[in-house]
Image (cartoon, rainbow, N blue to C red):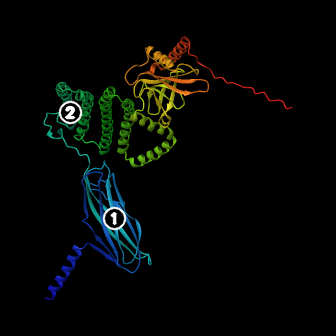
Amino acid sequence: MRWSFALSSVLLILTVAVMVPVVAGEGINVLEVQEGYEKIDEATESITFTWVAYNNDTEPYLLEIVGTLGPSSNGKMPSNVDLKIGQDYSAFEPGTSRQIVVVLSSTQAVESMDFPIYVNMTFTKMSDPDQVLVVPKVAVVHVEALFESTGNKIFGIWDNNFPSPFNTLIWSFIFTIIFWIFIAAVIYFVVDPIVHMLTRKTKTDLDDRILEVTRIPIFLLIIIFGLVDSLSIIDIPQEWHVTIILLYQILLILVISYVVYLIFDRVIIYYAQKWAKVTDTEIDDVLVPLLHKAGLILIPTFALGAVLSLFGVDLTLLVAGFGVVGIVIAFAVQETLSNVFAGTQLLLDRPFKIGDLVELDTGEICEVKKIGLRSTTMYNTADHEIIVVPNNDVVNKKVINYSRPDMHRSMNAEIGVAYGTDLNKVKEVLLKIASDHPDIIKQEGQMPYVRLAKFGDSSVDFKLWYRVEVKNMWRVASEVRQAIYDRFMAEGIEIPFPQNVVTLKEEKKRS
């Protein structure tokens, strides 16, 4: 009975020792958090091994962790694998616990293999450096390569059963490439013409333009993809695979960016220009070229950013840097930006349009020639010169539009007659002059009229009001003044000039 009890006790102790993976010594306990086997299913992933150490002693310890990689079963050391330890050295105070973390990661060029990692945890008692406890740990890792050879199979699917010498890997690769070229040729020479024939029957040419733009790029992409995909047949180093895939991704980004640009240029911009021609607004005539230029900048910029991301460049930092540079540039060109916003406001509000005759705040009367985002170009009709006005000045200052609300301009001729003149006759003569002139407008609501303006110091002043086409206003004004002078002379109506009567008063002599 006693032997039975003793044997049972020993078995129980051994069972506990096996089931609880604890290493104890001098008050230090290290426990497993997970099994000592992990698998990296795909290259570029990472796995983590974790242990928890407890310091049950009353003295502090110095913890040192060293991790190394071991060879595989065939004696090959793993390459393109990185082992990192969360904290190599640390003080381990009494009554505390510490997580020991080891992270294993691999690159795209890693090969498939099983290998061990060795982690040695060294606990040195600070009060007595001669007391050292070493706890070794071993974990096994399996890594799956990112690129695996499919073997001697055409398309990686069908076994190569051709007779010798065509039953080798290289011939499986060649046959697969030929099949991919055949597929691309069928799409280019057969499928695409049939689809193009169907799209010609549609009412719009949008689908035709898209097919025309994407036809050659799709052909090239199929061949390039087939070439890269066929590389899985032959057994080449993982580093070669990584380089080829990187080149393929760069080429793919460039081709897609080129297709996006062609669609933007030959489809979007094309229809935007057609729409701009049939609209009455000028804003689309300005914004469409601006949109085109923006596309020429943004599309290559996004392509460059995508390529840089393939090389591990952090685009967040670049964007932040460009943001800071943009703020600095904005401060430097704030006057230009102000004119751009003012130009946008002009195009939206449309206080005048191209061809309108306007009077600027400085007094020049000009014809509007061009409304740009930064400035407005005008033709000074009097001095025969081109004036370029910043849009900010146009928006914030008074501008008189002679062409609104219609192309008629209200004009007046002011004339003074001598006191004692028959005023009714003066009115009749002035109205007759206006009615006889062929370029003065005579329609309801815009008939010429005469008003007695004021009694001046030397004359009774009249104003003749009439309306003319804007383009004729200066000539008609001159002709009307000439006609008034001639008719007044013929009718004997005196046009006085300012005169003063001076009376001399003689002072009486003193007696």
Q: Residue at x 48, y 32 (%)?
A: 399
Q: Quadrant of residue 401?
A: top left
Residue at the spot of label 2: 180
- Would residue 430 appear left or right of 349 to someone viewing this image? right
Disc 2/disc 1 C-alpha distance (Å): 48 Å
**Label 1 secondary element:** strand
Residue 45 horizontal/vertical position (percent): 29, 54
Q: Quadrant of the C terminus?
A: top right
Q: Quadrant of residue 60?
A: bottom left
Q: What element does badge 2 sit on?
A: helix
Q: Whole-percent x and y of residue 32?
A: 27, 69
> Picture coordinates of residue 396 (x, y %)?
49, 37
Q: Is 30 in front, or is 170?
A: 30
Task: Judge whether residue 314 can be spotted in this image.
Answer: no
Vertical placement of residue 5 versus 104, above or below:
below
What label sits on residue 128 in the rendered view?
none
> Is 354 on the left or on the right of 255, as rendered?
right
Outermost residue, right side: 511
Q: Quadrant of residue 419?
A: top right
- Viewer-nearest residue: 199 or 222: 199
Identify whether 67 is placed above or below 134.
above
* Amino acid tagged 2: Trp
Q: Amino acid at mark 1?
A: Val
Crowdedness of circle 2 by 10 Å Cα count: few (<14), some, many (20+)? many
Which of the image's four quarters has the N terminus?
Answer: bottom left
Instruction: For residue 330, say whether it is visible.
Output: yes
Q: Which badge, 2 or 1, is on the more N-terminal residue?
A: 1
**Residue contact between numbered discs 2 and 1, judged by CB atoms under 8 Å:** no
- The disc label shown at residue 101, or none: 1
